[in-house]
Image (tube, rainbow, N blue to C red):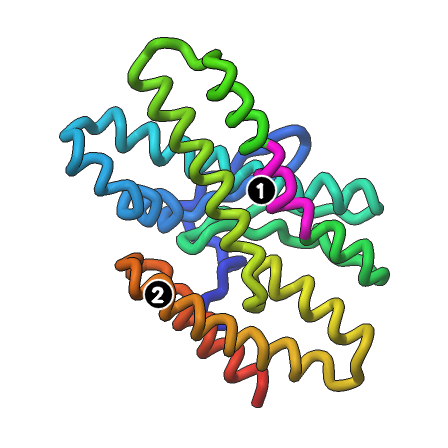
Amino acid sequence: MFFDYRQETQLDLHFHLFGVLVRIQPMFWLVSVLLGWSYFKATNDLAVLALWVLAVFLSILLHEFGHVLMGQFFGSSGFIILHGFGGLAVGSSDLSNRWKRIAVTLAGPGIQLVLWGILQGIIHASLVPDNPKIRIFILMLSNINLFWPLLNLIPVYPLDGGQVLLDSLTYFSANGRKQAFGISVAAGIGAAIYFGNSGQLFLVFLFVLLIMQNLELVR
């Protein structure tokens, strides 16, 4: 690991939501602002930037709650950390059964895609209030909860797709771990090239870090 996301800082925000501990690191807010800065540049409106940060916060929190709630269903407990590169549902997949672990892993992107479907229904039924700020917030939520879960399903460890890949390959092959990390490297290179061509430098940086991490794991 290049970053120890579990390391606590004095500036972390703590609260409980539905009995689950949530800890938010300062870098989460900073990266969210940086990712949404184009909205501010386009509108010169700090309220729009704040709506983006709120949409990011709610979406990633929902994703991690998907992991935690599925884990609780199978008897594990977990807590949530939001950090500069997303979030973690610590302890939610601490299960001996691999298929239960896979279900916990898929619950994160799954719950986001359910929200995306609900939002699409609201949009297509013309149920969005005729308020510019509400409309842009709904569109932000919709876009985030489609693109980000699909991004998370790319088979690059430790993204959700990579964790499913690891659990699956270690069931079918004695060399499953090495195979999973090798596939992660190849998929990461493909993702970095794709996002580089589309000018999404943050995602290029993210996948370069993941490629380096998986290269270490292959060795």
Q: Is residue 114 above or below residue 188?
A: above
**Closest to the observer, 140 or 19:** 140
Which element type, helix, strand or loop, lies under badge 1?
helix
Q: Is residue 200 above or below residue 29?
A: below
Q: Is residue 127 above or below residue 182?
A: above
Queried whether the magenta region covers residue 24, the answer comes back as no
User: Extreme front residue here?
Assistant: 124
Point out the image quarter for the C terminus.
Answer: bottom right
Which mark is in front, 2 or 1? Answer: 2
In magenta, the rendered stretch is: 106-114
Q: Amino acid at mark 1?
A: His
**Closest to the observer, 2 or 44:** 44
Image spot of residue 186 (x, y percent) = 51, 77
Residue depicted at 84% across the width and 46% down the height? 75
Q: Amino acid at mark 2?
A: Val
Disc 2 target residue: 204
Image spot of residue 123 (x, y percent) = 47, 21
Is 118 positioned to the left or the right of 98 in the image? Answer: left
| Principal secondary structure, stretch drawn in magenta | helix
Quadrant hosting residue 40: top left
Disc 1 target residue: 63
Residue depicted at 69% across the width and 70% down the height? 166
Q: CA distance from mark 2 to mark 1?
A: 22 Å
Image spot of residue 83 (x, y percent) = 45, 51
Residue depicted at 64% across the width and 43% down the height? 110
Image spot of residue 100 (x, y percent) = 81, 54
**Closest to the observer, 148 or 62:** 148
Among the two numbered marks 2 and 1 on one chain, the one whose residue lies closer to the N terminus: 1
Quadrant hosting residue 206: bottom left
For disc 2, the neighbor class at 10 Å (few under 14, some 14 to 19, many from 20) is many
Asked whether the residues under the numbered discs 2 and 1 touch, taking CB atoms below 8 Å apart as contact, a structural biologist would say no
Which element type, helix, strand or loop, lies under badge 2?
helix
